């Protein structure tokens, strides 16, 4: 561990890096147990988690703007006991060498409860509503006026490409 830390600090010095802000470091240190659980992602999700793709974004900054809106919908699920009260656990995945990004939200819920059966879809629906409210794109095709009548346009395109089908 000492060797690995020395190498890391050598790299930081070589590239004029800076230490991570104390508030960010403290968040990770205070919630390390939670993040250890998350590191066993597939096993954890099988037990009672949901993985909600939130959105593809224009940039890393845009992804973090979207992340800032997560509490607007997730806190209500936490307050009602439908989702585990944990750090706002999202991940931003860079795409095309950081020119774009994808953000996903990981959350835990009781899959054995009656309410758990609808929690996953409700979280995703509320996420989409908040995205639209802030002018972000919807993460997946949906129906209705809120989504630009996607279903109508998709059918027109299908008919144009496959007439008579």
Image (cartoon, helix red, strand yellow):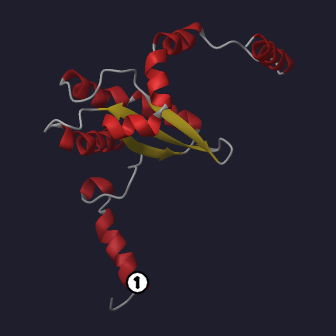
Pointer 1: residues within 10 angstroms few (<14), some, or many (20+)? few
Above or below: residue 11 compared with residue 102: above
Is 110 rendered above or below residue 3?
Answer: below
Q: Position of residue 128 (x, y in %)?
A: 32, 44
Seen from the viewer's position, the closer of residues 35 and 138 is 35
Residue 135: horizontal and vertical position, in percent? 39, 43
The quadrant where residue 136 appears:
top left
Q: Is residue 88 left or right of residue 80?
A: right
Q: Tell me the residue at 38%/38% (across/down).
A: 45
At 52% across and 9% down in the image, what residue appears? 26
Q: Residue furthest bottom?
A: 164
Image quadrant occupied by the N terminus: top right
Question: Is 64 placed left or right of 139 in the picture?
Answer: right
Query: Is any part of residue 49 visible from this angle?
Result: no
The residue positioned farthest toward the left in the image shown = 114
Residue 160 percent coordinates (x, y): 40, 84
Q: Kindly identify the residue that appears in the image at 57 percent across and 12 percent down.
A: 25
**Residue 33 sits in quarter:** top left
Q: Which quadrant, please, contains the C terminus?
A: bottom left
As rendered, which of 134 and 113 lies closer to the eye?
Answer: 113
Q: Position of residue 108 (x, y in %)?
A: 32, 31
Compared to residue 160, the image places residue 61 above or below, namely above
Mark 1 residue element: helix
Q: Is residue 138 left or right of residue 24?
A: left
Q: Is residue 55 visible?
A: yes
Residue at the disc numbered 1: 160
Front residue of 79/137: it is 79
């Amino acid at each position: 561990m000492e060797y690995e830390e020395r190498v890391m600090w050598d790299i930081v010095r070589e590239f004029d890096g800076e230490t991570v802000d104390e508030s960010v470091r403290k968040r990770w240190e205070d919630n390390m147990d939670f993040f250890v659980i998350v590191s066993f992602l597939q096993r954890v999700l099988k037990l009672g988690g949901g993985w909600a793709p939130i959105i593809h974004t224009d940039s890393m900054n845009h992804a973090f703007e979207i992340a800032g809106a997560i509490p607007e919908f997730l806190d209500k699920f936490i307050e009602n006991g439908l989702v585990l009260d944990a750090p706002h656990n999202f991940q931003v995945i860079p795409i095309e060498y950081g020119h774009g990004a994808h953000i996903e939200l990981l959350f835990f819920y009781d899959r054995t409860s009656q309410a758990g059966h609808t929690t996953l879809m409700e979280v995703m629906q509320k996420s989409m509503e908040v995205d639209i409210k802030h002018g972000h794109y919807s993460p997946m095709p949906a129906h209705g006026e809120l989504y630009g009548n996607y279903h109508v346009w998709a059918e027109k395109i299908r008919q144009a490409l496959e007439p008579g089908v």
